[in-house]
Amino acid sequence: MTKFIFFTGGVVSSVGKGVTAAALGRLLKARGFTVMAQKLDPYINVDPGTMSPYQHGEVFVTEDGAETDLDLGHYERFIDINLNQASNVTTGGVYAEVIARERRGDYLGGTIQVIPHITNEIKRCIHAVADKNGVDVVLVEVGGTVGDIESLPFMEALRQMRSDVGRENTLYVHVTFLPYIGASNELKTKPTQHSVRELRGIGIQPDVIIARADHDIPKEHINKISLFCDVRQEAVIPAKTSEILYNIPVLLAETGLDQIVVDRLGLASKQEPDLSIWKGMIEEIRRPKPPIRIGLVGKYVELHDAYMSVREALYHAGHANNRKVEIEWIHSNDLERDKGWERFTDLDGVVVPGGFGERGVEGKILAAKWARETQVPYLGLCLGMQVMCIELARYILNSDEPNSTEFDSQTEHPVISLMPDQHELADMGGTMRLGAYPCELVPGTKAAQAYGEAAVSERHRHRWEFNNSYRDRLGEAGMVFSGLSPNGRLVEIAELADHPFMLGSQFHPEFKSRPNHPHPLFMALLAAAVEHQEARLPQVERIVEQVNELEF
């Protein structure tokens, strides 16, 4: 029978449940087990697709087109698996399904209640992950913090799971935070004790406690947590904040967490745990490297989590190109007000990610113009490709009129326009072009060279497309449409022929990047950025020498 591991959080939110679950998933996979992961989100939105990035951070998209929580990105990157729609469940989705069944008469006139109807639907969603994928272990994370009123139905469903599938098939991991009191120079365990008491009041006794802290955790603190929370000492796992995100599986392995889980669930290891390749990757990340500055021009840069997958994809490609990527977070709104341009000094590459709405778009167009004119490597993602096309159209037509109908419905030059099947849609949620679609590459192009394949599959999340009426005009100006849908109708990748590297994709390559398998387009960007850096360094050195001579 499939084993279920449930992760709850205590004391504060953003304590690291998702990363902890992902890290344990990596350890179990290293032992030969098949693993899937699921996030239970207590908010009433059906999915995060319509939520502001300021509210929720990045919306991660799966292969089958689910708009999900950003923690699914952690699961995929750490465990190196592809998740699906069953991997993200929300309160809104649960209630929508139960209400739809009630309207159809499926409950035969019964009174619909949180228990058993809502909890049964939650449990059905949990079982669906195991049934759909046929895996050994399912990791289930509950969003929020123990004590939140909105998470109570999920907690009750988790409590019932132990009776439904048996104690030997369930394990509860509670991830808590130990605050540090500077005045007394000590960590405090009392909030963790209260958190576990709250959890036990719901009916869940944790089998493992992950004690998170920004400082070393003394042994006496572990003993105190064990005593007051009724958890074995060896199952209270100290987890000090790691400087390297991907080192967490290694640190947890050193505590014996995976062995505790295997023993507790009666799992027979299919092979000796082998983290040698992962540890080699960590050593490569840790090895000192020359820095390289990449500008990320976005409209939500105040919250870096809004671009989590983009950030991680840059880091992945940087390590593979022997560079430590330093991201310059540039707000596109500032560029529109002629502010922040000094931050472009010494950039060796520019990334313009996706986004929705008119705010900040002109700043992104200006960033594309700067990259084209200065010959600095550029990678545009979704909207980043579209603004690159708009900018070139404005240049060749000598007009500010070219635009997207998303931002100017009356523009005379709709270089980017709404997809035909999107015109009559009223609902905003889950109605875009979502998930994996095939893309055929044009031989001899930078895109084909980067991938080394004739055809690829990439994940989409957008409504607007390149307007084919402008293919010829932009093509005459040097734009190459190097990636197309199999029928040739949709532009998937565009690039400039007379530029060292200026390429945009209608899809989101960042979702498929892994720390040990960087995405080809990000690899190509970093390779071009390294060439740009190496070409300009002698010039910088000469200027420094001239300045030094003047000083003497």
Image (cartoon, helix red, strand yellow):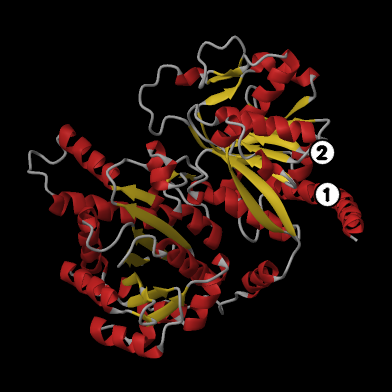
Residue at the (72%, 14%) spot, across then down:
398
Q: Residues within 10 Å of mark 1 (few under 14, many from 20)?
A: some
Q: Residue at x 62, y 44 (%)?
A: 296
**Label 2 to label 1: alpha-carbon separation:** 9 Å
Residue 169 position in % (x across, y down): 32, 71
* Residue type, numbered disc 2: Pro
Q: Which residue is mark 1?
A: 531
Q: Seen in the image, is 528 located left or right of residue 146? A: right
In the rendered view, would you say 381 is above or below 217? above
Q: Considering depth in this image, is 415 or 297 the residue closer to the camera? A: 297
Q: Indicate the amino acid at tag 1.
A: Glu
Decide: is 551 above or below 233: above
- Is residue 95 depicted above or below 185 in this figure? above
Please indicate whether residue 110 sits to the left or right of residue 185 in the image.
left
The answer, for residue 506, to whether it is visible in the render is no
Label 2 close to label 1 by CB (< 8 Å): yes
Mark 2 Cα within 10 Å, few/some/many (few <14, many 20+)?
A: some
User: Which of 544/1 is in front?
Assistant: 544
The residue sitting at 85% across, 48% down in the picture is: 536
**x then y, percent, for residue 17:** 40, 64
Q: Earlier in the sequence, mark 2 or mark 1?
A: 2
Report whether 204 appears left or right of 524. Answer: left
Instruction: In the rendered structure, find residue 42 and report the number of the disc placed on it.
Output: none
Tell me the residue that label 2 is attached to: 500
* SS label for mark 1: helix
Left or right of 549? Residue 118 is left
Q: Is residue 234 above or below residue 552?
A: below
Please state the horizontal and vertical placement of residue 414, each as a whole percent of the image.
59, 15
Tell me the SS state at disc 2: loop
Does residue 139 appear in this view? yes
Quarter where residue 369 is shown: top right
